[in-house]
Amino acid sequence: MNRFVKQYRCTICNTCHGVKEVDGLTCPTCGEQGILDVLYDYDAMKKIVNLDYFKQHKDLTMWRYAPLLSIIPNRHDEMLETGWTPLHQARRIHEHLGVRKLLIKDEGANPSGSLKDRASAIAVLDALNKKQQTLACSSTGNAASSLACHAARMGLSTVIFVPKRAPLGKLAQLAIYGSKVIAVDGDYKQAYALSKQAIQTYGWYNRNAAINPHLVEGKKTVALEIAEQCDFKPTDWIAVSVGDGCTIAGVFKGFFDLKQLGLIDHIPRLLGVQSKGCAPFVQAFHKKGTLVEAEENTLADSIAVGIPRNPVKALSAVAESKGHWIAVSDEAILEMMVKLGSTEGIFAEPAAAAGLAGVRQAVAEGIIKAEESVTFIMTGNGLKDPDNARKAVRPPTLLKPSLADLKKHMENIGEQEHAQGTFWPDLS
């Protein structure tokens, strides 16, 4: 355990537990519902983690933040390089969205193509520290493929439980990485339930991010990077799509840590974005009530979680940052995939593009002001879900190898469309 970890706090009963008091991953009193938060000794941490630390540190991966993590990252130098992903300043799409400045954090550049690599890298090293050889989780795809990727690198085995709707691109990744894939004839809720029973039965390492408090700590490194890449002057807003709630909880935790260390002067406002087809957090926010189960009716599979397992942390993250929740249609998600690709050259999977669709809607509703700046966390690469990407675009026209036919085709599609370099339909 990292020497700066002070204790754990239950998000349900708020009881604090010493590091040695917690045998499992959740609160000893509240059971599985008692998700834990890791508390740090920031006064002690300040003596090491300061501006000079970052200026002198040469490791441009997520492990440059080792003092701020809850585990001791032994053997991290043997891992695939994860983190320190590009932070691009938008050249065109911010004008379409109606904001002054947009930064795009491209998490698709991670080894398995998503932000989930950050959590899975932590899980693998934690399992090695605990001398466990098999890791397991339930997932709609990204958590699974990232876990299989990093476990394979370190010689560990994985058992993955996926719902039957998991995209073929992500299932292919799992197979290539050598994972034992259990396809569950049901939704994410049912896949999670079976994974829970199996983990208890076989004693596998539990990589389910909502249950395992260390994995949120891994996800928070995306916020640490954003802040550092912005010279510790983050944008007004951070926009991210939300499924289980672990990622947005991690984003808040990263900025919270930096605020406690005196490295940033404010925590950005968080915009949590869900699909209208599966929006339990949005419904709870607008009804000012408790979170209830929602249908999983969206093509954005990575955020299709009807019963989020980390509701308290996620809702608290948005509330404490004075942020907002918003839901967007699948049509808006598909449109934003095309817009992001054709204006910025970045290919996002549907769940990732949802965050950007949320920014546009938030601007339209006056939640985000035109003069404000936004960082959009692009959580996963579009190649993970090519089938849904095809729904967003018109298939190419098959022509005979004839210049005359080509000229006729170019006239039909229109000179203006040709000049813009895209044959895709206007989905707006």
Image (cartoon, rainbow, N blue to C red):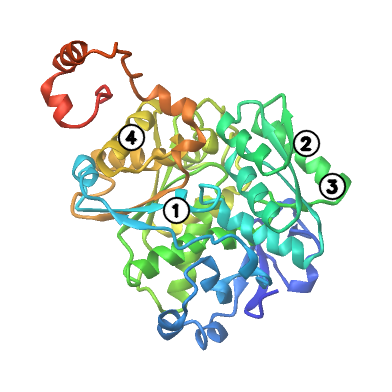
Q: Which dot marks residue 194?
A: 2
Q: CA distance from mark 2 to mark 1?
A: 30 Å
Image quarter hosting the C terminus = top left
Question: Mark 1 or mark 2, which is nearer the start of the sequence?
Answer: 2
* Disc 1 target residue: 318
* Disc 3 target residue: 200
Residue type of the residue flagged with mark 2: Leu
Q: Which dot marks residue 336?
A: 4
- Nearer to us of marks 2 and 1 is 2
Q: CA distance from mark 2 to mark 4?
A: 35 Å
Q: CA distance from mark 2 to mark 3?
A: 10 Å
Q: Percent from the top left, x then y, of residue 334?
A: 37, 29
User: Disc 1 on helix, strand or loop?
Assistant: helix
Q: Percent from the top left, x then y, of residue 123?
A: 68, 58
Q: CA distance from mark 4 to mark 1?
A: 23 Å
Question: Mark 1 or mark 4, which is nearer the start of the sequence?
Answer: 1
